[in-house]
Image (tube, helix red, strand yellow):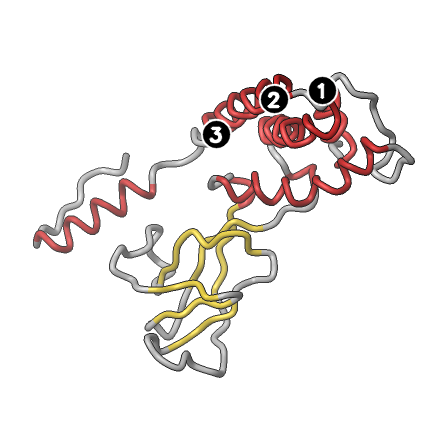
Amino acid sequence: MTSEVDISNIALAYLGANQITSLDDDSNDAALCKLMYAGLRDTVLADREWTFAVARVQLPALAAAPDWGYTYQFQLPPDVLRVLNLSDDKTQPVPPYDLKWRREGSAVACNSATIYVRYLKRIEDPNKFSPHFVQALAARMAADLAWPITNSRETVEQMTQLYALKLQDAMAVDGMQGSSDVLRAKQLHSARYSGSSSVGPYV
């Protein structure tokens, strides 16, 4: 079981700081962890397409259409961190490259009457994080906590470098799962506009 306190304590350990038992502990370190945790969690979640944070849903259409530019608008889920792509055909695993859309606030404007979205969602339960993500998030916390806790520019630089390494490791492991939708989409786009009916094998 992984908790917010566990992740915070990993960050504090990187800094050589005292461990905490709760984010509500009566200590400056606990107060800083509580202040920074949620925001940094969402930041690291939104940085890349983490497999455990990707969701697909059909978006509900809003009654009011955009004033201009698009025909329809759709409500985004409340837990959306970043919209990855949209499709108007749920039978296709790869969204069409020529589908025009734009995110505006908590809605998406588009010219298609039915829309499916693939997005990064806010994950609040740390037990749903991958082990490598936990390490990356802890390193990011350490980088942001370094100055207020240690007042050392050298430590800030060290923790920033550590975060880059942990993030790279987490991204490499996470990227091993599944085929490349990006390459497949490029093949489909190329075939559509070259007149070819063959897009080649999946990669």
Task: Give the answer, above or below, for where 202 lies relative to 103.
Answer: above
Q: Residue at x 88, y 32 (%)?
A: 27
The numbered dot on residue 15 is 1
Task: Give the answer, above or below, for where 201 lies relative to 116.
Answer: above
Secondary structure found at label 2: helix
The outermost residue toward the left is 195
Q: Are marks 1 and 2 in contact (CB under 8 Å)?
A: yes
Q: Amino acid at mark 1?
A: Leu
Near mark 3 (Cα within 10 A), the count class, few <14, some 14-19 or many ≥20, is some
Tell me: 192 left or right of 68. Answer: left
Give the residue number, with chain letter if any, for mark 3. Answer: 171
Q: Tell which circle, 3 or 1, labels the residue nearer the N-terminal end.
A: 1
Q: Position of residue 68 (x, y in %)?
A: 35, 79
Q: Position of residue 73 (x, y in %)?
A: 43, 74
Q: CA distance from mark 3 to mark 2?
A: 18 Å
Give the residue number, with chain letter if any, for mark 2. Answer: 159
Q: Residue at x 62, y 23 (%)?
A: 156
Find residue 67 and report its image quarter.
Answer: bottom left
